[in-house]
Each structure stands twice: as C-alpha cells, then as structure tokens.
Image (cartoon, rainbow, N blue to C red):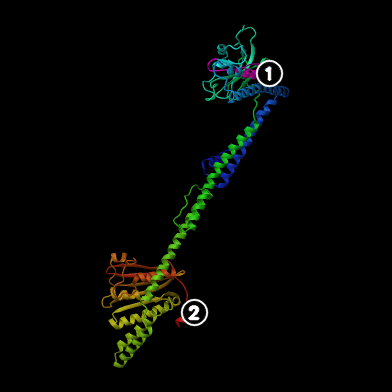
Amino acid sequence: MNLQGIKERAGRMFTGTYHSIRTKLLTCFLVVTLIPLFSLGGLSYVQSAKVINTQFGKYGDNAVAQLEQQTSSALGRMKQTAETIYSYLLDPSHSGIGNGTPSTYGDIMEKNDFESLLKSLRTQLTAGIYIITSSGYYYGENNLDVNKLGNIPAWNARPKAYAGTYWLGFYPQDHSINNSGSDNLPVLGLAVPIHHPDKAQDGSVILIEENAEELLQSYAKFEADTHAHLLITAPDGTVVYETDAPYTPHGSDVAWTRTNTMVVAIVSCLLAFGIAYLFSSRFTSRIRTLKDSMQKVSFGKLDTRTPIDGRDELGSLDMSFNRMVTGVQTLIGEVEQSERLKKEAELRAFHYQINPHLLFNTLNSIQWKARLEGAEDIRQMLYHLTMVLEGNLDISQELVTLNRELRMIGHFLKIQEIRHGEVFRYELDCDEALLPYLIPRMTLQPLFENIFFHAFTDGQGEIHVKVEEDHDELVLTLRDNGAGIKEEKLARLFSPEMKRKGRGGLGVRNADQKFKLHFGPLYGLKVHSVKGEGTTITIRWPKREESFDDESREH
C-alpha cells in the first residue's frame, strides 16, 4: 500500500468514516496498550542515557547516591529532633514553658528541664538548637543574638503563614552574641513553626542547625571531579543548595535525577485506565439504554423507541429494534381491528338470525296456495325468494364458492325480473375454472340490492359482472349505468359512521369488512362512481379453494 493510501485510510478513521465497533475497539486497545508502553519505554530511554559513558555514568550514579544518602541523613536527623521537641512542648504537663522570660521558681525549673532536653538531643554535628518565641525570648544555649537572625537570607524569606518544616539551606553561623565574623561555621538550618492556639508557645519557631562542613566538602569534591552544577531542593521547592558558579546548559550535558520509576508506571496505568473507562462507558450506556427499552416493551409499552446514536453496529441494532417494535405495534393493531370486526359480524349475525324452518314452511305454504289459485308469477317469485333466503340464512359456512354466490344472484335477479319485467340487462363474464374459488357469503347480493333500490329507476338499466384472475388473486368488477353516487356520499362510503338506509342490505361497507376480515386489510372493495353515469365496484381477494368438508356441506 502506498503512502497516499495510508493517509486516506487514516483520515477516514479519524474523521468518522469508519463506524464499526471493531475499528473503535481496536483503536482504543491500541491507545490503552501504547500509553504504558511508550511511557515506560521513554523512561527506560532516559534512564539508559545515564550509561552513555559507562565509567563516567557509574561514578556519577554512585557519587549522586552517596550525596543523596549524606544529605538525607542530615535532614532526617534534624527533622526527627524537631519532632521530638514539638511533641514535648505539646505535652500538657509542660505548661511552665511560656512565651517570655520565666518569672516564678516553677517556670525556671521547667526552663532548666527543657534546656536539659535540648542538650540531650545534641550530637557531634549539632551546631545549635533553639526555640525562639514571638516575644523575642529564646530557649537553648546562651550564645544566640536573636536580632542577628535576620542575617540568614532564608529566615527573612519565610512565608508569613506556613506549616510543617521550612529548610533555611546552608549559611554561615554568624548570629552568636560574641561573633568576630572570622571563623563563622557553615551550617544547615531547619525552621519549624509551632501552631497551637491553646499553648503559650503558639507562634514560636524551632530552629535547628547542624554542622555542614563535611557535607559541603563532599558537594565541592563532586562539583570539581565532574564539573557538575549541583542543585538540591526541598519537597516544597525551596532551594537547599546550588552551586555558586552560574550554569549554562549544553546539549552534551548528563543529568542525574533521582526519579521513582514506580510512580511513572502507576501514572501511565491510571491514564490508560481512564481512557479505557471513558471509551467503554459510551458503549455500555448505549447497551444499557437498549436493554431498558426492551424491558419496557416486554411490559407492554409498545410506544417505546430507542434513540439512534451513531452508525455502527449498535446504531443498526437500535434501528432494527425500533422497526421491530413498530411492526409489532402495527400487527397488534391489525389483530385488534380484525377481532373487533369479527365481533361486530357475529353480533350482526346473531341480531338478524331467525328461525329458517318456520320461514321456509310459511313460504312453501304460500307457494302452494299461489299454484292452486293459478298465480304463477307469485309462485315463481316465492320459489326464487326461497332459494335466496336458503343461501343467506345458512350460517354454517362463512366462505362459499363463487358458483354458489352467483347462483344466489341469479335467483335474486329472477325476482326483480318478475317484479319489473324484462327492462334490465345482465351480463356475466366468468371463466368456469374460477367458479370453485371461495368468496365470503352474501357479499354480492347487497351490492345488487343497492343497484335496484338506489341506482335504477323502475328496474331499468344494465349490469355487467366480470371475474378474472390476476396471478394469485381474483378480481371481480361490477358495473352499472344507473344514477351513480354523489361525491360527498362516496367519500363517506367506508366510514364507520356511515349508517345503512332503506332496503340496501348490509351495504358496501359491510361487504368490504367481510373481505378484510377473512383475507386481511390489503383486500376489499374499491368504488368509482360519477353522478348520472353509473358506478363501478372492484373487488380483489386471494384465490382460495374449498376443502373437501366444505364441498360436502354445500352439496
């Protein structure tokens, strides 16, 4: 792969073109892995730079370690001495040590005991131990001129309010009462403030000085042998010692610094952990949100949707989840609608249910009476009416063959022919191969009733029925040249608020509901009508053949 291709891929990665979780996780793992690796590698490189010159490096390391040991030993002794004095002063039993000159015999005895303690804390290297009170009075050897403490540079530079230890650095001990100034001893000083509002020593300062001749000689020897610039600082950043000669940095300099490798490793690991946590928390929060949404859906809250955040695999999962919930919600709505329509149909069938035996026996009696009286037209009408009612009142089958439904239409038309005469024309265009397919029972008769009761005047007009197949579906077209339907009524034809009027049967809407109830919401009736020009009704439903049991019941 050429350089240009690498640049393009890197650009897409950082600009967000790559949205897969795999790429993001790989990037995170690389970053988390490389941070400690580079940190420790860089630290190792810095440490290895110390051995560029083997002999010089070893000497320098050993010399620095020795100087560190000597310095730390001196600082530790002085700090321990200060802590012992501080603890003594805070003891409630030593209340006679005040902030000024002792005035009672008890205070003098307490002063003597305290100064005896100070003498016991002295070592061969101790140059002085004093407690300077805020009033200017001090405890310790009687060779201190408090007013000369201002000659110590670091003493004047002390902060107004500080706690803990304050290193005064190296300076000549020229604050004695009888100081000639010729043989001032170089010392290392430590100042410790006393903060205890309930004690009389509050505001006093513990001053400890230690002979620094040997330590300064070691510093000077190291500087002379290595031509080094030595800098020693306290933990608070105060400069304890620095070579007098000015320091000019050079590119070939070798620096010896006492560094804790474990601290660098811990900081690197914490940084890597922080980056990994921030990166992973984004994924876990998105997964947790999706889990909460799934739980809400399981409780029946189908209006729950998950926010889509990102175009990675989790984003695709969020979109799929939202589509699934939407589909389930739609499906449940369709099932509820179907159940409602089924209930309505059952209630309607129950409402219109009558005793067929009583009706048929009565009609047969009237038919025989008409034959005896010679009223052949009446007998014919009663015969065809009986056949129509026999098909309509047989509720044992909801789906009947198209052949049976068309036969019922034939009997209905015979009744209209006897009633109005041969004033209308009826045409049927249907292949015999389509007659065995099933259709909801009593769905065509209400449509023909509407034609004779609302579209035709005195039964005059033309009716054309065409049945054809369209792949796996049947299409029935019912066309008449009657009065047509008004536009506003046509718009409300399938509305639930549309009421049935007159003798129009169950009407267009009820027929449409039957097809939807049996075959689904995609099927049913479509009505096209122009006022004064006629009406065309198109019915579409899937092909379904009757079973053997249905055929046996029909015959």
Callout 1: 10 Å neighbours few (<14), some, many (20+)?
few
What residue is shown at x 47% (from left), y 80% (from top)? 551
Q: How many labels does the image show?
A: 2
Residue in the foreground of this view, choosing between 430 and 62:
62
Q: What residue does disc 1 label? A: 123
Q: The disc labelled 2 sits on which kind of residue?
A: Asp
Left or right position of 374 against 191: left
Residue in the foreground of this view, choosing between 320 and 126:
126
Q: Position of residue 425 (x, y in %)?
A: 32, 78
**Secondary structure under the numbered disc 1 in the rendered image:** loop
Q: What residue does disc 2 label? A: 549
Q: Position of residue 196 (x, y in %)?
A: 54, 25
Q: Which circle's residue, 2 or 1, is located before the other in the chain?
A: 1
- Tell me which corner region of the image, top left, top right, bottom left or bottom right, holds residue 80: top right
- Whether residue 134 appears in magenta in the rendering, the answer is yes
In the image, is residue 484 above or below residue 66?
A: below
Q: Position of residue 296 (x, y in %)?
A: 48, 55
